[in-house]
Amino acid sequence: MIKIGLCGLGTVGRSFVEHIDESYNLIKKKIGTDFEIAAIADRSIKNKKHKTGIQISEDPMSLIDIEDLDIVVELIGNVDLSYNILKQSIINKKQVITANKALIAKHGKELFELATKHNTFIGFEASVAGAIPIIQTISSSFSNEKVISIVGIINGTSNFILHKMSNSNCDLQSALKEAQKLGFAEADSSFDINGMDAAHKISILAALAFGIKPPLDQTNVEGIESITNMDISYAKELGYIIKHVGITEISDEVVHASVHPVLVSSTNIFSQVPDEMNAIIVKGERFGQTMLYGHGAGGNATASAVVSDLVSAINHINHSTSSYAQMIETVGQKSYKIESLDNTNSQYYLRISADDVPGVMAEITNKLAEKKISIEAVTQHEPTDANSPIPIVIITNNVKDLLMQDVIKNIEKMKNTKDKVYAIRILSSDG
Amino acid sequence: MIKIGLCGLGTVGRSFVEHIDESYNLIKKKIGTDFEIAAIADRSIKNKKHKTGIQISEDPMSLIDIEDLDIVVELIGNVDLSYNILKQSIINKKQVITANKALIAKHGKELFELATKHNTFIGFEASVAGAIPIIQTISSSFSNEKVISIVGIINGTSNFILHKMSNSNCDLQSALKEAQKLGFAEADSSFDINGMDAAHKISILAALAFGIKPPLDQTNVEGIESITNMDISYAKELGYIIKHVGITEISDEVVHASVHPVLVSSTNIFSQVPDEMNAIIVKGERFGQTMLYGHGAGGNATASAVVSDLVSAINHINHSTSSYAQMIETVGQKSYKIESLDNTNSQYYLRISADDVPGVMAEITNKLAEKKISIEAVTQHEPTDANSPIPIVIITNNVKDLLMQDVIKNIEKMKNTKDKVYAIRILSSDG
C-alpha cells in the first residue's frame, strides 16, 4: 500500500482528491499497486470537508515526519514553505510532487540535485501549462534530438483577457474581473498581468530543454499591462491577433528567454488559442514543430497533471517501466459494442443540385421539415452556366445520421433534383 | 552494446540512420548504453549507399535469425511480410519497432499478446501521426482517467490537398500531384484519398484508448474523393473550412469509429492545421480537451518517432525508468551564455501618438529610414476626439532589438509625438 500525504486542500487539492476517488480502479490497475491518501495538512482543515479515518493536521510541515508516508504532494503555493516541505521530504526519502512554478524556477536546480542524490522522484508536471503533458513529453519523446526553441502561450489568465478584449471589446480591467469571477485568475493577479507567472514557466522549460539552471533572473519580462483595445483593433485590421507568449531558444550555445506580447498572424495556429487555453510549440532539429494544446488553468486540469506525476512517482517506487507495456496489454481486453454512426447526431452541410424552377427550394425544405430537421443556413448559388443545375447549400441543425440519410434519399428522388446529394458532417466545437 | 537490425532503407529508413548518426551522443547519454545499427536488409541494398562494416542482406526475413541482434526495426510497408518479420522476431525474443499502420490495425491485438507473452517491447509510435508523440502520451499522461473521445486530422496528404484546394483554388487531382512531387503522398495514394489510411490510424487509437481490438472492420470509412472546389467555397462563405478527420468515441460502453470529411468552424483550432500537418484532440473526463499537433508525414518526422521507440526499446532491455530521472539530472549541467534580446531580430508593431500636423508622418518614417528599417505597413487612424493626438501604427520588417529601441527613443524625442511608443514583437510563422 502506497501512502500519500497531501499539503493544501484548496481548489487543486480538492480536485486531486476527487480525481483519485473517481479513477481509483483505473490507476490501481495501471500501476499494479494499491494506494491511498493517508494524511492531509491544511491551515483551515477544520472548516473543510475531508475523508474520515486519515491523519489530519493544520501544519503542512507535519507531513515530512510521518514515517510511513511514501509520497508528499505539495499544493500550497507559498515558495518558502513549499521549499522547506520538499527539501525535508526528499531528505526523508519521500517522493515529492509540486505544482509550484515559482518554487521550481527559483530552487529547481538545488531540489533536482537533492532528489537525484537521494534517488527520489520529484514531479512538477502541474507547474507548467496545467493538463498539457509538456514536462513528460520533453523528458521522453522530445529528448532524442536537439531542441531549438520553445514558444508558448503559458499564462491562461492573460490569454483569457486578450481573447476577451479582442472578441467583446471590453477593457483589460473588466476582462480581468471576469477571469477572477470564473476562478482561474488569482485574487492577486499581478503575476499574471506583469508576466512573472509566464517567466517562471518559461524558465522551467528552458532548464529542461537546454540543461541549464532555470534562467529566471536573465529572463526579459514584459506583461500585458500596456495593451489597449486600440492595439487589438489596429492589429486585427492588419491581419494579426495579440497574444502573450514565453519564448526560449538556443543558437550557437547562446540561450534567450523572454516573455512579452507578440502579434501573431491570423493564419498562425496560435491565433486560434482561445480563452484560458495554453499552447506550447517545441521545435526540434528533426521532428520540426510540434505543438501541445490544452487547459492550462483550473482545478481539474492542474490536478490531472498532479495525478500523472503521482503515477510516475509510484512507478519510480516500484522500479517499473510499466505504462507502455500495460497499455498494449489492455488491447482487446474490452469487448465494447462498436456501432455504426446510424444513431449518432451531428449538424450537416448538404449540397444539392436542382433545376432552376419555381418551388424547388420549397420542396426541398419541406422534405427536411417533414422529418423535423431545422435549417440553420441556406444559400442558393448561381449555376455555372445557363443550362446546368443550380447548387443549393443547406446547413442543418443537429440530426440523427440515419434520419439524415433517409431525407437525403427523399431529396434525391425528387423530379427537379440532379445527381447525388453531397453531405458532410459539421464538427462540433467540443470535438 | 545494443545491436539494431533495420529492414527497409527507403525514405524513413535513411532518415532513421541519419538521425541516429546525428544524435548518437545525446541518445547514448540518455539511455546509458552504447548501441549501433549492426545489420540492414533491403531488396535493393546493392544500389544504395550504406555504412561499411555491417551485415547487409537483400532478404528482410534474414534479420530474424541473426542471434546477436537485440532490436529489429521494420520500415518496409508490406503487411504480410512485416507481419512475419515482427512475429518471428518477437518469438526470437527481439524487441521490435514498426511504422506500419495497416499491420497494427489488422494484427495489432495478436502481436501485442505475443509481445506481452515474450516480454518484448513492440513500438509503433511512427504508425500514427509521424512526429506527434500520440502513442506515448496515450500510454502515460492520458491513461489516468477515462478518455471520452479522439478526433484527429491524421492523413497528411488529404489535409494538404484540402488546404491547397481551399487556398489556391486548384482541383483535387492537381493538388494530389503536388503532394506526390513534394514526396509525402505515395505513388499509389488511393489509401490517402479514400480514407483507408486514416481508418488504420483511428483504429489503432481506438484500441489503445478504449482497450478494444482495433475496430478496423467496424469503422465507417469515407474519403475526400467527392469534395469539390464548390463545396470548399460554399463552406467558406458560411464560415467553415472542410477537413478530413478520424473520430472515435465511447459512451455508455458503445464505441464509434469513423473517418470522413467534416466542416470545421473557422474559429475552431482545427481550421488552422495547414498543409500536411496533423493534429489530434484527445478529450478526457477531467483533463478536458488536449491537442497534439505536428508533422504527420515526411521521412524526418516519421523517423524521429522510430527513434523515440528505439529509446523505449533500449530502456525496456535495461529495465530502467530513466528518461524522467535523467532529464532532471541534466538541469544545470550546461552553462550556456544567456543573452538579453538586444541582438535578436524581429518584426515590430509600433503604436505612436502624434499631433495631427503636416510632416509628422514623414518625420517618423525618416527616423526609421535613417537606420535602414523598412516599413511593411503603416496606418494612420482618426483621433478619438478632435483635441487628442492621432494614433499611427507601423509594422516594420525584421530589425535588431537594440536598434529598434534606439529608434523608438528618437521618435519619442520628437516635438510632435506624445506619450511612449508602444512596441510589440511579431511572432514569425516558424515560431
Image: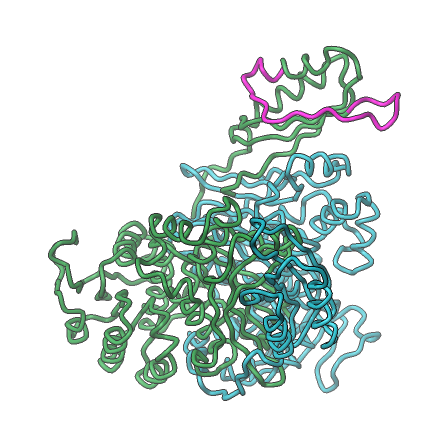
Chain colours: A cyan, B green
Q: Position of residue B159 (x, y in %)?
A: 47, 56
Q: Is residue B352 above or below residue A361?
A: above
Q: Is residue A100 visible?
A: no
The one nearer the camera, B286 or B190, is B190
The one nearer the camera, A179 or A235, is A235
Q: Any magenta on residue B370?
A: yes
Number of labelled discs?
0
The residue drawn where x is 14% and y is 69% is B59
The residue drawn where x is 24% and y is 78% is B84
The magenta segment: B367-390
Q: Is residue A150 above or below residue B305?
A: above
Q: Position of residue A183 (x, y in %)?
A: 78, 60
The quarter of the rendered structure image containing the C terminus of chain A is bottom right
Q: Position of residue B337 (x, y in %)?
A: 47, 37
Residue A61 left/right relative to B125: right
Residue A129 left/right relative to B311: right
Query: Which quadrant would residue B12 be assigned to in this image?
Result: bottom left
Q: Is residue B282 above or below residue B114?
A: above
The quarter of the rendered structure image containing the N terminus of chain A is bottom right
The residue drawn where x is 13% and y is 65% is B58
Query: Which quadrant would residue B377 be assigned to in this image?
Result: top right
The residue drawn where x is 79% and y is 60% is A182
The one nearer the camera, B132 or B31, is B132
Q: Position of residue A10 (x, y in %)?
A: 75, 67
Query: Which quadrant would residue B79 be assigned to in this image?
Result: bottom left
Q: Any magenta on residue A167?
A: no
Q: Is residue B94 visible?
A: yes
